[in-house]
């Protein structure tokens, strides 16, 4: 990061445009035009560090994406579309590509995916683990038992739990603070709270869950609160699926004992 906010924003914009598939020259050219409104190839080259001979190719690339307008004067002048329109253009493109990917993957998936009966599987990163948890919640038909720390009980998780409860799924939660419990009971009145066996605040524990007695997941916060959620090392998990899966068998026994104990108390 530099001491110049403008340069920081410029670098971020160029990086993101490249991630959306633009060439480095095209990304720099668009950012230069966005910052100055319009310009000739000479002007763009001066402020973007793009060789003047490459500006025209970069503009053609941008024009194909609908990101610039060209005035056929002498010399030619170029205008960048607004930041709002550009963002909307990339959002549409991302949705289109995501839909194409989803359709392609659905075509190659087996008609009835088989549940893994053996082995323990791993997944890293809070985003990836949350996606796995949400998939389990979406497939739940009977019961969800979920223990976690407050930082990982996001709006997205609570919404998914609420949708499961509306389907008639029994939702039981443990290991959360009183504030979070109050919030859950407000948003998911049918949820049942139970006391955790562990002092989660003194450990690196992240999540512990079981769905329908058939799917389980355990995670730990690898680098603690200092890790960014986007860091693949921020959280790591193991999960298992299937009635005879070893991880499922062990956690099912623990949960069954704990919940029976909680009910008797």
Image (cartoon, rainbow, N blue to C red):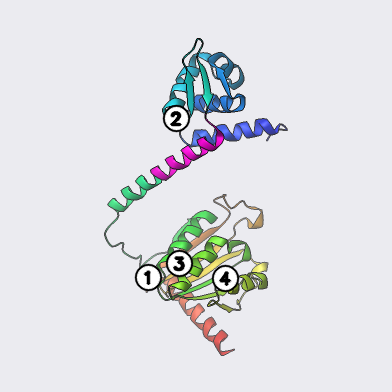
Residue 125 appears in the rendering: no
Q: Which residue is mark 3?
A: 137
Name the front one of labels 2 and 1.
2
| Rendered location of residue 9, percent (x, y) | 63, 34
Local packing at callout 2 (Cα closer than 10 Å; few below 14, some 14-19, many 20+) is some
Q: Is residue 99 left or right of residue 2?
A: left
- Mark 4 secondary-structure assignment: helix
**In whole angstroms, how far apart are the C-alphas of marks 3 and 1?**
16 Å
Residue beneath the point at 31% across and 53% down: 106
Q: Which residue is mark 1?
A: 242
Q: Is residue 265 left or right of residue 60?
A: right
Q: Which residue is mark 2?
A: 66
Of labels 4 and 2, earlier in sequence is 2
Q: Which residue is mark 4?
A: 187
- In the rendered image, the residue lying farthest to the top is 74
Rendered view: 50 above or below 245: above
């Amino acid at each position: 990061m530099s001491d110049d906010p403008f340069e920081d924003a410029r670098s971020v914009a160029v990086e993101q445009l490249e991630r959306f598939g633009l060439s480095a020259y095209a990304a720099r050219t668009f950012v230069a035009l966005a910052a100055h409104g319009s310009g000739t190839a000479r002007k763009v080259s001066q402020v973007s560090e793009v060789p003047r001979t490459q500006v025209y190719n970069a503009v053609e690339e941008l024009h194909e994406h609908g990101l610039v307008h060209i005035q056929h004067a002498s010399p030619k002048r170029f205008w960048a579309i607004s930041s709002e329109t550009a963002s909307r253009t990339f959002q549409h493109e991302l949705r289109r590509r995501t839909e194409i990917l989803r359709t392609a993957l659905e075509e190659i998936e087996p008609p009835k995916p088989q549940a893994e009966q053996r082995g323990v599987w791993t997944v890293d990163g809070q985003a990836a683990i949350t996606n796995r948890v949400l998939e389990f919640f979406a497939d739940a038909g009977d019961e969800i038992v979920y223990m976690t720390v407050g930082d990982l009980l996001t709006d997205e998780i609570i919404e998914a739990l609420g949708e499961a409860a509306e389907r008639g799924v029994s939702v039981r939660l443990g290991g959360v603070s009183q504030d979070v419990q109050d919030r859950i009971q407000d948003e998911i009145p049918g949820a049942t709270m139970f006391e955790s066996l562990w002092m989660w605040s003194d450990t690196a524990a992240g999540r512990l869950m079981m769905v329908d007695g058939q799917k389980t997941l355990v995670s730990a916060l690898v680098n603690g609160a200092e890790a960014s959620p986007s860091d693949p090392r921020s959280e790591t998990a193991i999960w298992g699926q299937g009635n005879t899966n070893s991880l499922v068998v062990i956690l099912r026994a623990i949960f069954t004992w704990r919940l029976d104990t909680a009910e008797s108390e």
